[in-house]
Amino acid sequence: MIIGNSAAGVAAVEAIRRVDSSTTVTLISEEPYTCYARCLISDVVSEGKTVEALSFRRADFYRELRVDFRARDRVVKLDAKGMKVQLASGEEVAYNRLLVATGASALRPEVPGADLSWIYSLRSYEDALAIGEAAGPARRAVVVGRAGAQGGQQAGSRY
Ligand SMILES: Cc1cc2nc3c(=O)[nH]c(=O)nc-3n(C[C@H](O)[C@H](O)[C@H](O)COP(=O)(O)OP(=O)(O)OC[C@H]3O[C@@H](n4cnc5c(N)ncnc54)[C@H](O)[C@@H]3O)c2cc1C
């Protein structure tokens, strides 16, 4: 079982299939999409790209590699002794081996106002959609941090 359907999770699927064609591989992802290049999500803001345009594997990747792909469900509990995980939907899924490929989340500085509704993080496709929507009426934006090589700058290029 692999938790996380991004660069690490997808690379792990391919590595497993290179040496083992028969083991059941279950891939759990809280995001509803097939894998997409997170480092390009600023293009969603600056160029209006869709999540399909950011995909870094063919649509039939999961079927071809015989992956039991479960999107839109979050692992909320890990029972390492019992070798199973619990999903937000309530389902329990057992495993023999587990890879946690859950990446990271954006860090919000602990300063007053950081939780205001018009302050955004850029980490997921949905974050990028929200920033793109806010960019329309906004006249000025401030980018804090350095999202990848150019992500923050590109995201700010709509202003
Ligand atoms: C704007 C931006 C620009 C970037 N630019 C670059 C760049 O130029 N060069 C570079 O090398 N890197 C760049 N990066 C970093 C790169 O995208 C990450 O290093 C890479 O995505 C990490 O991949 P990952 O598979 O480890 O984790 P992630 O991509 O974070 O994926 C983890 C996945 O696990 C899912 N998940 C988390 N918890 C759970 C759970 N409990 N249950 C189910 N699913 C869960 C998440 O929803 C996510 O889909 C950039 C990142 C951003 C945000």
Image: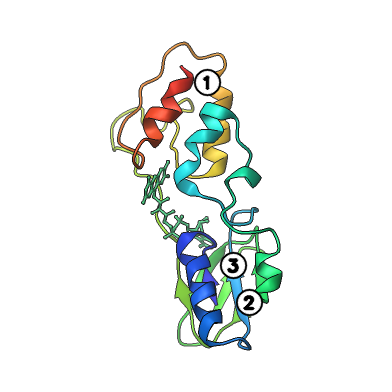
- Residue at 29% x, 38% y is 110
Q: State the residue in front, 40 or 122.
A: 40
Q: Which residue is mark 3?
A: 28
Question: Which comes sooner in the sequence, label 3 or label 2?
Answer: 3
For label 3, being within 8 Å of ligand 1 is answered yes
> What x and y, as percent, mark residue 66?
68, 77
Q: Mark 1 sits on what residue?
A: 135
Query: Callout 1: few (<14), some (14-19), or many (20+) C-alpha neighbours within 10 Å?
Result: some
Q: Position of residue 94 (x, y in %)?
A: 59, 83
Eyeballing the image, is 99 above or below 38? below
Quarter of the image where the N terminus is located: bottom right
Query: Quick one: SS at disc 3?
Result: strand
In this rendering, would 109 be left or right of 84?
Answer: left
Asked if residue 91 can be seen in this view, the reply is no
Q: Position of residue 112 (x, y in %)?
A: 31, 29
Going by the numbered disc 2, the residue's amino acid type is Glu
Residue that mark 2 sits on? 92
